[in-house]
Amino acid sequence: MIKMRNREPRSEDLIKGMTGDWEIVLGLEVHAQVTSKAKLFSGASTAFGAEPNTQVSFVDAAMPGMLPVINRYCVEQAVKTGLGLKAKINLKSIFDRKNYFYPDLPQGYQISQFKNPVVGEGEIVIDLAGGRSEVIGIERLHLEQDAGKSIHDLGPAASHVDLNRSGVALMEIVSKPDMRSADEAKAYVTKLRTILRYLGTCDGNMEEGSLRADVNVSVRKPGAPLGTRCEIKNVNSIRFIGQAIEYEARRQIEILEEGGTIVQETRLFDPKAGETRSMRSKEEAHDYRYFPDPDLLPLELKQADVDAIKARLPELPDDKKARLISEFGLSAYDATVLVGEKATADFFETVAKGRDAKLASNWVTVELFGALNREGHSIETSPVSAEHLGKLIDLIADGTISGRIAKQIFESMYKTGGDPAEIVEKEGLRQVTDTTAIEAAIDAVIAANPDKVEQAKAKPSLAGWFVGQVMKSTSGKANPQVVNEILARKLGLSSEG
């Protein structure tokens, strides 16, 4: 029996129905492919994109007499993930046979874990809009082997089977039914994927099938007992998870409000139609006829080995976020954005080291992220290196260039990958700090606009127009602070100097 946290429903999360408010209750089963070069019970490769049926051992193909041998590294990866989820590590766990027939399951059963998983209860803290956070419970993490892949579109009269994925190690991470909205579910998968990537236990590539979710959706009147749930199978996009939940919740509410009942079943989400449709009646544990796999001994771990894995854990997102806030003085929002991907956080720290951290954060999250998104690049493929972006900030800080010119230089850096100092010299973009040259530019603007001078003296806020004209005449190279100081003195707007 999976326990859930008692939460007071938030009005923002409730769905308005014809008979009043409804509350969504959500739990997710995330299947994460273990980052490993070999499969869970064989030495066959797990590389993505190989020709069909070229990475299949005799064990994966269920040839007679072939026995599974546990991959120690996959077990270590599962333990590492459990520790990253602040979960209990079970020193003794058992592999079971989960029996069902499907064409891409050669054995006629899947080796999984049922009552005794390798990882027990844990938790994830998710970050939500408005600075709100929620703790989502983890019920368990168990290891299991993946099935193959059925292919139905190669011809009108036959289906085909690719067994390359057969036997690939999966971690099934089961949440408690603690989520109450599509946004919370999306935030949960996002945070879980981030943790897995920090740990290096799953690459999280949903488009390659490395991470996919089964979404359990039910609805109820606030405070009422749990409703009947439907499982939406194999959703492979965070956006689709949100869409599937929204549709399924409203579908169930409509049925209930019309006097119907919800049938517990497995459904599929059709992204093109934006709707879920029935796949099959939901199986229960007894339907799978679980029993301990006779070919595999119980998995017994030593506490010393678990402790050694724990000692090697990297800094995880929540800890890194707290450090960026305390060490660099960042806002909680900026820190949350930066720790979303480990590569981004590392990039930022290189840029910010010894510099104005807030300025570094703005250049990374606004200018760089904006350019990367426009051009379809990731932080790993950024044409602008962290070292060069740091140098650009140094040029602003020491007065070599203005913030306005810096944006122009950044565009050149993005196109060429060049060093900002070299671009400044090559394109003659060094900031003008010579007060004589700036004063001459100001005098020319004042002489050409006597009417504006009188207006500015009457209304000092209009002095900004003169600043703009001077910057324009100097191609943006004049030091803005010097321009403001000299202009204020010449217009009689300052008592200084």
Image (spheres, rainbow, N blue to C red):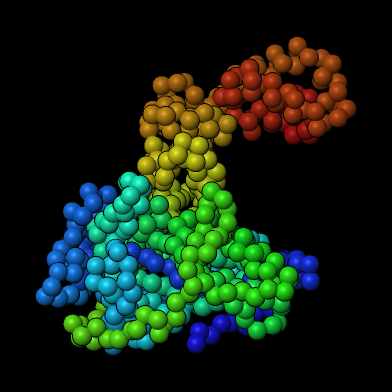
Can I make out residue 83 in this image? Answer: no
Could you tell me which residue is drawn at 34 percent across and 84 percent down?
289
- 21 versus 364 height, above or below: below
Furthest residue toward front: 157
**Residue 355 percent location from the top left of the image:** 47, 48
Q: Nearer the viewer, residue 226 or 251?
A: 251
In this rendering, is residue 215 above or below 242?
Answer: below
- Where on the picture, by quarter, is residue 201? bottom left
Q: Is 99 displayed left or right of 195 in the figure?
A: left
Tell whether 216 sits left or right of 490: left
Q: Quadrant of residue 463?
A: top right
Outermost residue toward the left in this view: 65
Decide which of 239, 430 is in the foreground and name it: 239
Q: Quadrant of the C terminus?
A: top right
Q: Nearer the viewer, residue 437 or 276?
A: 276
**Residue drawn 52% across the image and 33% down it:** 406
Q: Nearer the viewer, residue 55 or 170?
A: 55
Name the spot of residue 427 as percent of width and height, x first: 45, 21
Q: Residue furthest right?
A: 458
The structure residue drawn at horizontal position 48% and vertical position 74%, both measured from the top left corner, is: 282
Is residue 460 among what the camera can see? yes
Q: Quadrant of residue 473?
A: top right
Instruction: Report how many numbered discs are placed on residues in the image.
Output: 0
Picture coordinates of residue 413, whole percent (x, y): 42, 32
Q: Is residue 244 left or right of residue 102?
A: right
Residue 474 vs 87, above or below: the answer is: above
Is residue 19 shown above or below 454?
below
Q: Position of residue 67 (x, y in %)?
A: 14, 76
